[in-house]
Image (spheres, rainbow, N blue to C red):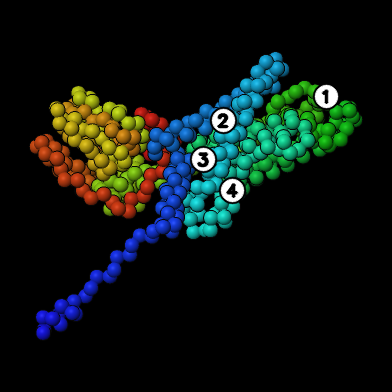
Amino acid sequence: MGEGRANDERPTSPPVESAPTGLLGRWHRDRARRDALRRRVYDVLETGRGESMLATIVENGLVFLIFINVAAFVLETVPSLESQYASLFFFIDWASVAIFTVEYALRLWSCVEVPFLRRLPPAQARLKYATRPYLIIDLLAILPFYLTFLLSTDLRVLRVLRLFRFLKLARYSPAMNTLMRVLANERRSLTGALLLVLTLLLFAATLMHHIESEAQPEKFGSIPQSAWWAIVTLTTVGYGDAVPITGLGRLVGGITMLSGLIVLALPIAIIATGFAQEVGRRDFVLTWSMMSRIPLFADLDAQAITEIMRYLHAHNYPARWEVIGPGSPGDAMYFVASGRIRRLIGDEEQTLAAGDFFGEVALLDHAVNEHSYATLTRCRLLKLDRAGYQRLHAAHPEIADEIRKVADTRRGGTSPAKPEANADALPIEETDLDLLPDEEETRL
């Protein structure tokens, strides 16, 4: 009896829900395939070059098409070429609009996969995404073609709007994005510099009007007329169509020229300084992200990482590139931030992944490298040269000791146990790495 009650009281597992069947099941399967396709389209269009072969082909193809459009736009203004190749120019315009329209539609369709738009309803997410600057440029790039069928306006005006296609390159240029951020960040300083230029312009035009108006009423008869001279003089262009002839006027002209050199240098200095600061911030975030993927550096605080960053060089290598060859001087070691490295020891191959490092044996022994290290995939590496290692050993001997332990293990012919990677490591954005020169080192 007791055994029977025990069997009766034994908990039963919940029933397994069967997958939907019929029309409902087909709808679920179609929706899953549609969502997977949308994510794939988003990855290809928004993630960009380097993530997959298809994304690289699409991005390079769109960039090439933009340049073809700009070339056709310029050559179309030559009368002899326009009459001879009118059909070709029309085909280029028609095909480009078709491709750019499909691209615009696919970006709107897949934008619900953007992380900051996922919580919004699809219609609201697409509307918000359509008002972003890049999407507005995409729309203006194709709008003139369709307006020619709807409006009876001068086609030359619509042709000028085709130049917006050239602005589509901003999406694929990290340097241009950096410059736009600099202009946005320094807008207050640039506005102040512009006000200073306008103030100097107004004072120079007013003074020259009162000094030269009697001698040259046709050129300095009013402040607006004198303002043209002031603009030309401040920018040191000097067309020569209006020049002072009185002694006092020439004195004011000389002072205006010197003042123009000083004042116009301010915006250039502001932009150059802001660009350097922006690149420095980007390099800091990028290197921090790379270092967080390396277990030796994962537990360091911000001050220690900032100090170690001064010793490292960031590298971005393509696939199948030999980083260290047999017989090369052991003057540096490398940390793998992402990608895979092939280590060739005789006929034996070993694979190093994110978190590993190599080249430390020859560096510590002041010898040449005995083995070959080449990239299997695109890799992001941090290079530590001999001088940097000595500073690292002095500042953080515990890290240098870990490197020595791994070197001692590899001298013995065994592979060291790979430490656990940092699960909280920050992802490295591919677009951030486009500013790093391939096969060249950048001091951070």
Check the picture and name the quadrant holding the N terminus: bottom left
Q: Earlier in the sequence, mark 1 or mark 3?
A: 3
- Under circle 1, the secondary element is loop
Q: In the image, residue 330 lies at what x, y percent?
A: 22, 29
Q: Earlier in the sequence, mark 2 or mark 1?
A: 2
Q: Earlier in the sequence, mark 4 or mark 2?
A: 2
Q: Say which residue label 1 marks.
A: 245
Q: Are marks 3 and 4 in contact (CB under 8 Å)?
A: no
Q: Is residue 62 left or right of residue 161?
A: left
Of 177 and 236, the residue lying toward us:
177
Q: Is residue 57 left or right of residue 332?
A: right
Of 267 and 427, the residue lying toward us:
427
Q: Which mark is residue 130?
A: 4
Residue reaching furthest to the bottom: 1
Q: Is residue 213 left or right of residue 367?
A: right
Residue reaching furthest to the front: 22
Q: Is residue 65 left or right of residue 444?
A: right
Disc 4 marks a residue whose amino acid type is: Ala
Q: Which mark is residue 66?
A: 2
- Under circle 2, the secondary element is helix
* Mark 1 surroundings: few (<14), some (14-19) or many (≥20) residues within 10 A: few
The residue depicted at 52 percent of the width and 32 percent of the height is 62
